[in-house]
Image (cartoon, rainbow, N blue to C red):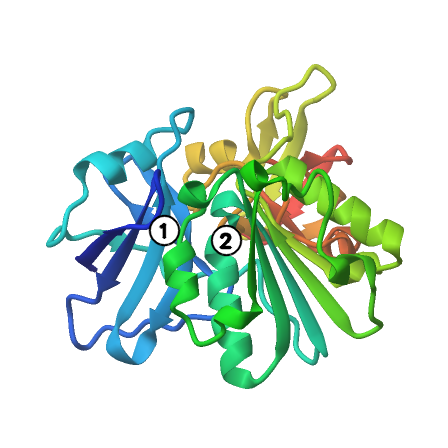
Amino acid sequence: MVVSQRTVVSDRAVLLHLRLVRADDVITVEPGAHVDLHLTETLIRQYSLVDASPEEGVISVCVQKEDRGRGASRYVHDSVSVGDRLHISPPRNTFALASGAATSLLLAGGVGITPLVSMASSLHRDGGAFELHAYAARAASLPLLEYLRSRPYAASVVPHFSDEGDSFRVSGPRSLLEPTVDGMIYACGPDGFIALARERALESGWRDDQFVTERFSSDAAPGSPVDEAFTVVAASTGQKMKVEATESIASVLERNGYETYRSCGQGICGSCIVPVLAGVPDHRDHVQSEREHATHSQINVCCSRALTAELTLDI
């Protein structure tokens, strides 16, 4: 895709509009989806789609500059300009809207607003009832604030700023404290924000399956002292491969010639999921639901391990 427009949307964030280069290419997008931006051969990062016009071959992503990040955000801010070409992955969705919800409560912490904008657009277009509450330290630091104020659903958007005494740590929206049987909550932002939102939701009587989230980073600790070696079996060949305590399943598979696709490497993007045919995984991802984990039918090979001595994968 080619960068067709670049707009500053906060004191640290830019909005990139990307357009398909080839007219015969097709892109299919769902609200809540994300793509991998291949910034260089080795610098690949995931960004939620803010908006999309698939029929026009255009998508947009918002990138906030993170001084403590892994370099991708700085690269985008310092090196990506209008006219540049970027390779992207097909959109993936691990943060999808549930069908049939009577109401939707969207909770955003900082740049966590990005996937929720596409959800708000979809809900408004389909006539769904929703509220979008966006929290930030101050108005200048909330990405896409002016963009949201220009949307036809602006009346359903409520910004909250800590420097005005309106902090999520102090209080949340009333609708969070008033559960409904057929409503849904979608939360995105820093881990602390999500944890507090979930805690308040469950304390107020929302069911756990009504709370859907997407994380920016994994708080798992791969390679910790409790990890032990185990064996992975490739069902296609019967080959058995030892996975040491300090290495991932993905790295062992790749070393032995089996192709895997791992993008984030932290269990937050869902790109590396592989079906499990035998054995019990030790799930360490933040993509699959608790119900999916309980089936032990698939595993994120970038971060998860095994609870059994052997794990047979459909690869």
Q: Can residue 263 be seen here?
A: no
Q: Quadrant of residue 256?
A: top left
Q: Is residue 174 toward the left or the right of residue 22 in the image?
A: right
User: Residue 56 in the image: x percent, y percent?
Assistant: 25, 77
Mark nearer the N terminus (1 vs 2): 1
Residue at (63% x, 31% y) in the render:
219
User: Residue 7 in the image: x percent, y percent?
Assistant: 24, 53
User: Residue 210 in the image: x percent, y percent?
Assistant: 76, 63
| Residue assigned mark 2 | 113
* Other-residue count near label 1 (Cα within 10 Å), few / some / many at <14 / 14–19 / ≥20: many
Residue at (76% x, 59% y) in the render:
174
Q: Is residue 170 toward the left or the right of residue 164 in the image?
A: right
Disc 1, SS:
strand
Residue at (33% x, 75% y) in the render:
54
> In this rendering, is residue 106 above or below 135?
below
Viewport quadrant of the N terminus: bottom left
Q: Quadrant of residue 11?
A: top left
User: Residue 144 in the image: x percent, y percent?
Assistant: 40, 54
* Other-residue count near label 2 (Cα within 10 Å), few / some / many at <14 / 14–19 / ≥20: many
Disc 2, SS:
helix
Q: Can residue 192 be seen here?
A: yes
Give the residue type at disc 1. Answer: Cys
Name the one closer to the observer, 195 or 95: 195
| Residue assigned mark 1 | 62
